[in-house]
Amino acid sequence: MNTAWLLWSLLFGCAGLGFFLYGKKQRAIVPLVCGLALMLFPYAVSNVYFLVPTGIVLICIPRFLKI
């Protein structure tokens, strides 16, 4: 395990929890799904160079996709 991977996973997991709780409270599907994805995808990705861009894209999706 890499320290950078651990810290980035923690950051994306916390952001995912925030999106998930916001989506659940507001009954908004996009932040809810992005939150789940942000919390779960670090378990499947072991490469930091793939983890960071994917996490940034998942964080940006609710900003640009309003449904």
Image (cartoon, rainbow, N blue to C red):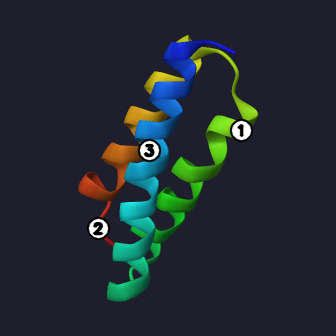
Q: Position of residue 61 (x, y in %)?
A: 36, 50
- Res 23 quadrant in image: bottom left
Along the horizontal axis of the image, is 60 left or right of 46? left
Residue at figure coordinates x 46%, y 23% from the top left: 52
Front-lying residue, 9 or 23? 9
Residue type at mark 2? Lys
Q: Secondary structure at mark 3?
A: helix
User: Which one is earlier in the sequence, the residue at label 3 or at label 2?
Assistant: 3
Name the residue beneath numbered marker 3: 58
Residue at figure coordinates x 56%, y 20% from the top left: 5
User: Which one is earlier in the sequence, the residue at label 1 or at label 2?
Assistant: 1
Residue type at mark 1? Tyr
Name the residue beneath numbered marker 1: 43
For label 1, count other residues whose C-alpha is less than 10 Å away and answer few (under 14), some (14-19) or many (20+): few
Front-lying residue, 59 or 9? 9
How many badges with numbers are in the image?
3
Q: Position of residue 67 (x, y in %)?
A: 35, 74
